[in-house]
Every structure is written in C-alpha cells, then in structure tokens.
Image (cartoon, grey):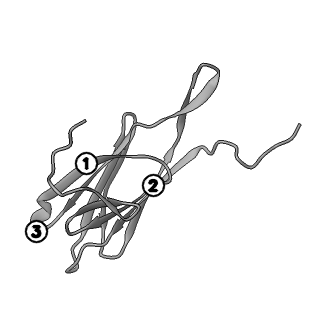
Amino acid sequence: MMMTNTALSDTGNVWIRNSLPNQKDLIVHCKSAKEDMGYHRVHPRGAYNLLYKLRYEEYFMRLYEINDNWCHLWQGQDFKHHQVFDVQSGEQWEAREDGIYRWSALVYAWDQSRSQ
C-alpha cells in the first residue's frame, strides 16, 4: 500500500496579526459551535495563532471538513471598533487601521455590517 504525505491533519491553524498604528492593542476572541478559545490581547506587530481541532463528517463516502469557527476583533480607544468573521484553517488575517485583511486584501471594514 502506498502512503502519501497529503493525509488529513487533525489541527487547524489561523494567524491574526496586529498591524494597527500608534501602539494600539488588538483584542481577539475566537469561537466555534463547541469551543470558546478565550480572549487574547495582541500587542502591536504581534500575532495570535489560533489552533483548533479539525472536525470531519462523511458525505457520499468522502470526508469533508466542518468549518464552524469565527473570530471577533476589537481595536481603537476603549476597543469600541469591532468586526466578526468566519475563519478557515490556513488563513492569514491582519488588522489594520482601515479594516481586516486576508492575504493582503481588504475584506472587512471596522464596524461594517456583514450580509450573509
């Protein structure tokens, strides 16, 4: 039997970097339907590495990753600016003054309502 190195990993990994100016801290709170990862304060130029156990379900004889993870971010004076978004394993997010970026592309502005 031939084995490959593309086997399913059992750990998800998401990076959230604080690139806010003026020495602003970032508050990160990530959750899933089954687990609360807690609140984390990320200092300027620092990052939060979200590690979580991947869950799979079988559908038509194939395994599919169940993604039910999301993160809340707060920044600004008294942390009044907020955004919440879904995350998937392997993603890299960055908090900047004008919003939340994924892979260097602006995805969410702060305090913007999401339509989903």
The amino acid type found where label 1 is placed reads Val
Instruction: Classify the position of the C terminus by image quarter.
Output: top left
Disc 2/disc 1 C-alpha distance (Å):
15 Å
Q: Estimate the x, y position of residue 113 in percent, counting from the top left.
A: 16, 45
Hey, which quadrant is residue 7 in on the image?
A: top right
Q: Residue at x 11, y 59 (%)?
A: 80
Element under disc 1: strand
Q: Earlier in the sequence, mark 3 or mark 1?
A: 3
Residue 77: assigned label: 3
Residue, x 52% and y 43% (percent of image)?
A: 53
Closest to the observer: 2 or 32? Answer: 2
Percent of width and height locating residue 30: 34, 49
| Amino acid at the residue labelled 3 | Gln
Residue at image mark 2:
91
Q: Position of residue 64 (x, y in %)?
A: 55, 31
Q: Nearer the viewer, residue 68 or 112?
A: 112
Mark 3: few, some, or many residues within 10 Å (few <14, many ≥20)?
few
Query: What is the secondary structure assignment of the residue under circle 2?
Result: loop
For label 1, the residue is 84
What residue occupies the far bottom of the structure in this picture? 22
Dot 2 or dot 1, earlier in sequence: 1
- Kind of residue sitting beneath label 2: Glu
- For the residue pair 107 and 25, the one nearer the viewer reads as 107
Mark 2: few, some, or many residues within 10 Å (few <14, many ≥20)?
Answer: few
Quadrant of the rendered image containing residue 59? top right
